[in-house]
Image: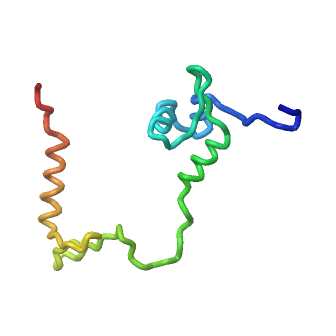
Amino acid sequence: MNDTEQLPVSYTPDEAARILRVSRNTVDALRARGELGYWRVGRRVFITIEQLKAFIKNQSEGTCSNDTSDSLNTRIIGSARDRAVTNSTSRSMTADDVISVARHRARQILKKPSKF
């Protein structure tokens, strides 16, 4: 290696967590999911500044546009007289259907786990 060639700046997962302002567990989870690149020397893990920049770039959301057209994720909820709710799949659900689904999901969340 000649004198003009520079090694990339590398950080430990703890340092990367401080830079990203997240916990060490979050950095480990991002690495496990393949969302954050890293390299190893033996058992030690390092994350380069380029890998951090690439992760941040992939996480960045675009600026808001002035487009007022409906997006695919927009739901239209009618007035009390019009009890239909339209979702992005173009199905109509009544307000009672929405309440029923919400109750069912709440019961699933709050249900005691079955014993093995």
Position of residue 13 measured from the top left corner of the image (x, y, whole percent) = 57, 30
Q: Quadrant of residue 116?
A: top left
Q: Quick check: 116 left or right of 44? A: left
Asked if residue 77 is positioned above or below residue 26 in the image, the reply reads: below
At x 62%, y 28%, the residue is 12
Q: How is the image coloured?
A: rainbow
Q: Residue furthest front?
A: 1
Q: Quick check: 6 left or right of 85? A: right
Q: Quick check: 26 left or right of 46? A: left
Position of residue 7 measured from the top left corner of the image (x, y, whole percent) = 76, 34
Position of residue 72 measured from the top left corner of the image (x, y, whole percent) = 36, 71
Position of residue 46 measured from the top left corner of the image (x, y, whole percent) = 62, 30
Q: Quadrant of residue 33?
A: top left
Q: How many marks?
A: 0
* Camera-side residue of 108 and 38: 38
At x 58%, y 35%, the residue is 38
Q: Quick check: 3 left or right of 12? A: right
At x 21%, y 71%, the residue is 85
Q: Residue furthest right?
A: 3
Q: State the quadrant of the N terminus.
A: top right
At x 73%, y 36%, the residue is 8
* Camera-side residue of 101 and 6: 6
Asked if residue 28 is positioned above or below residue 54 in the image, the reply reads: above
